[in-house]
Image (tube, rainbow, N blue to C red):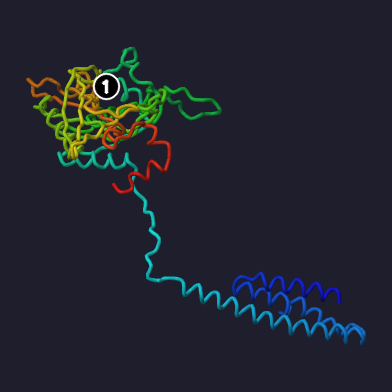
Amino acid sequence: MDDLDRLRTDAFRDLDASADAGELETVRVAYVGRKGRLTEILRSLGARSLAERKSLGSAANAFRDEFEAKLTARAVVLTTAAAETRERFDSTKPGAKLHRGHLHPLSLVDADVRRIFTGMNFTVVEGPEVETERYNFDALNIPANHPARDLWDTFWLKLPAEGGKLARPNLPHKFGFGHKLLLRTHTSPMQVRYMEAHNPPFQIIVPGRTFRYEATDASHEINFYQVEGLMVGPDISLANFKYVVERFFTEFFRGKDIAFRFRPSYFPFVEPGLEVEIQVQQTTNGSSRAVARGNKQQTNVWIEVMGAGMVHRRVFDAVRYNPDPTAGGVQGFAFGVGLDRLAMIKYGIPDIRLFYGGDLRFIHQFRSL
């Protein structure tokens, strides 16, 4: 009788706790199913005395009737609640908006740059991120003892371990014999690679990721994206370069007033070398939009965006091009522009580290672009 009393307490508690038809069916099976707790008690009556069968059997049957009555009442309550929930549901109400994936701002800028240059008949080529010292420096007129090496803080690599010992980085390797390996510091190595495999005239851009070992701040990162440009032909001049660059920036910053300034500068793989500075100003309803520079927002400032110049004769010598235009040779110009910097200017982003921080609050701002 004590077991029956505990069974009654457990059964009514579980009935009240059932939240839907599935849970209610589980309770029914647990107590009055073929292997239920009450069914086991009723089956044990045959082994008991006559007095026990009378008292326990009568009480067990009464409990079963009471349990089934409460089971039916609970089923009615749950069915009514489910019907009321369905009635409250408005099937004509619009569903929750799903957030679709979108492109990263650097991907947006990269696609825009490719579109503009291919529209000017440039070919898009790509190259390896792991480079040799020859392509990254030597063939670009930056030999081992050249002070210009200090302009690039380089990640030098070592070959995988061989025989339990770390191989020397100047051993024969698939990248070439006797050339140290590094993470490319610019996309300029593809100038040499492409010229070795192709004859002029041609015009290419080389977008890709580059690496430099330096301290990070609002305008510097250890990895960033760059686009290299190269045009080579018999009659290429700085006038051609000026046209291409001005057309590119005018298209890239469409709807804004762009001013250009070309200043002499030094890069070992071009001669003469120059820097391109722009001033971006957009006026809407009498108000001006600032452009990003470092960690500040400024207007009417000159921003250096591109290093460029005419390809150095020694670079042509490295690929065995004739650099003498008077003897049927070729000339060319090259330039490099940072995608991160373009994105910062275009979207007013004050810190380059935001591109690589993984903060979705920053990334989601570009959902509608």
Look at the numbered disc 1 and give the secondary structure of its residue: helix
**Horizontal relation, residue 326 to residue 23: left or right:** left
How many other residues sit within 10 Å of disc 1, few (<14), some (14-19) or many (≥20)? Answer: many
Name the image quarter holding residue 178.
Answer: top left
Report the residue at 78% width, 74% height from top.
7
Residue 49 in picture, x, y percent from top left: 92, 84
Give above or below for 350 relative to 8.
above
Quadrant of the frame with the N terminus: bottom right
* Camera-side residue of 182 and 217: 217
Residue 79 in picture, x, y percent from top left: 56, 78
Q: Decide if residue 117 is in sight here.
A: no
* Camera-side residue of 59 and 23: 59
Q: Decide if residue 101 is in sight here.
A: yes
* Camera-side residue of 102 and 310: 102
The residue that disc 1 covers is 140
Give above or below for 13 relative to 238.
below
Residue 22 in picture, x, y percent from top left: 60, 73
Report the residue at 78% width, 85% height from top.
62
Name the image quarter holding residue 127.
Answer: top left
**Horizontal relation, residue 357 to residue 304: left or right:** right
Report the residue at 14% width, 21% height from top.
323
Residue 261 in picture, x, y percent from top left: 16, 23
**Horizontal relation, residue 294 to residue 158: left or right:** left
**Looking at numbered disc 1 in the image, what kind of residue is underneath it?**
Leu
Report the residue at 24% width, 20% height from top.
269
Name the image quarter holding residue 354.
Answer: top left
